[in-house]
Amino acid sequence: MASSAISPTRTSSFINKKDFGRFCFSSTSQLSIHKCKKSSVSKKIVSVMAPQQSERSPATTGSVKTAMTLTEKIMARASEKPHLVPGENVWVNVDILMTHDVCGPGSIGIFKKEFGENAKVWDREKLVIIPDHYIFTSDERANRNVDILRDFCIEQNIKYFYDIKDLGNFKANPDYKGVCHVALAQEGHCRPGEVLLGTDSHTCTAGAFGQFATGIGNTDAGFVLGTGKLLLKVPPTLRFVMDGEMPDYLLAKDLILQIIGEISVAGATYKSMEFVGSTVESLTMEERMTLCNMVVEAGGKNGVVPADTTTFKYLEDKTSAPYEPVYSDQQARFLSDYRFDVSKLEPLVAKPHSPDNRALARECKDVKIDRVYIGSCTGGKTEDFLAAARVFLASVRAISINYFTTSGQTIDSIKTSYLLNSSLRQLILGKKVKVPTFLVPATQKVWMDLYALPVPGSDGKTCSQIFEEAGCDTPASPSCGACLGGPKDTYARMNEPKVCVSTTNRNFPGRMGHKEGQIYLASPYTAAASALTGYVTDPREFLQ
């Protein structure tokens, strides 16, 4: 098998002198253990779970401290506690609260009801408000939601409000960003060791930066607006160790679909999912964001990748705020370990109607599709579009090489044929998509990248040029788009019972619009390959 679940070794209730010394002086622990002195260790066996009776009062006896996971350490710092264990309920100080146009008005209403019409938010510089869900629509209620956000931000003098006023031309709104989870990273609001809460279930995306990030409801957000605090239960941690060289036909989307298929949509319910291993270390920040983005699809409370040089380099030009990363102790207790040899994995899809309905892409080659959607917080980042463009480029090479090596023509005759034969011109210019292919960049920056960044190996062509040659739709205005359906005039919404291959994160009935629509979740590689054939397609047909 490509993966295996390994239950953690049970830790004895007793530790001997040798273990006690190592425990006290562990270089990885950030607890106040420097007071421990090896010379004071008794030769007797020490009981951790059931200490011997003593005449000293419990207050002076203290407690035996154990190692902590990354998530436990962040929550301990945020709650000003020296040590936490899973199951404890603690008041956590929030570093960043994010809300958007769908949940923002409700959160604001609760805040005003409970704290007063004239109440002020706890910190105007720690609140980030990002319109992104129902933006480019004529729906009056959706437009009203953005108006409510704008009025509140003016009233509260909120520093980070990414407003949009001109819905006809998003480029006329320099403050407008797009999808909140991608914008949070691009604007420097994601920092290692911090607590970031948001009124959106995919707030867990920010865990890619080595921070605790999770989604909360409107009531909780209303309370945070007034106090800057929230009562949270410390989750136990599942560790996912991914090693092996990443094949060039796989992306992080395949990795997280593999994990969700392994543990199910309930396998990480109210648990932290920590991703480690050589494969994870090799991933870019955007790929790590994809990995953490879908932990909620497994029921996870949060996902986290330990911060490293890749993280620090990404943040260099995005934030000047100080931050302090933390890491799991070597002796930290994990509820379970899951290990994967990534080099043996294959491209995957999640079939309707659940993210854990895992299947190999090649096993679905007979599934005819009606459309392809590339976008969202999961699959609408710059690197996602570069990946799709790579498949379209590869299709050009594969077809052109096949033609030239089997036609038996001379170079001169091929040139003549190219000038006279429109079919041959189309062949050399590139294979066309067989189904409507919708492109929705996550943010304004991503949209600009599609028109500015040259695609590697394309002789200077940009993504937009390659997409145009392939017959894709013109890249749309940046937003959440049709990922969660939205008003009926939302771009690319499924208003009919279609079959769609999508780079989004959920495929429940009605998720992208029509309740009878069928959604196959896939990586940008698989989505682009499927667009070229009109069937669910393994990208290795073009990339190898």
Image: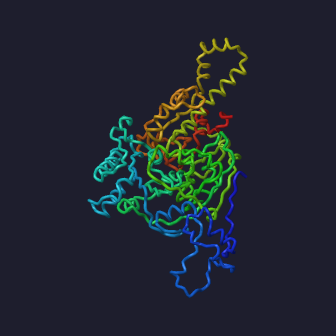
Residue 267 percent coordinates (x, y): 60, 59
Can residue 359 be seen?
A: yes
Q: Residue visible at 51% across and 32% down?
A: 453
Residue 159 percent coordinates (x, y): 35, 49
Q: How is the image coloured?
A: rainbow
Is residue 499 rendered to the left or right of residue 321? Answer: right
Along the line of sight, the residue nearer the viewer: 334 or 133: 334
Is residue 468 rendered to the left or right of residue 275? Answer: left
Can residue 520 be seen?
A: no
Residue 62 percent coordinates (x, y): 54, 78
Along the line of sight, the residue nearer the viewer: 403 or 495: 403
From the image, which quarter does the C terminus lie in? top right
- The vertical placement of 415 against 287, above or below, is above
Q: Residue visible at 64% across and 45% down?
A: 348
Residue furthest to the left: 118
Residue furthest to the bottom: 55
Residue 13 percent coordinates (x, y): 66, 75
Q: Residue visible at 70% across and 46% down?
A: 343
Q: Quadrant of residue 225?
A: bottom left
Q: How many marks?
A: 0
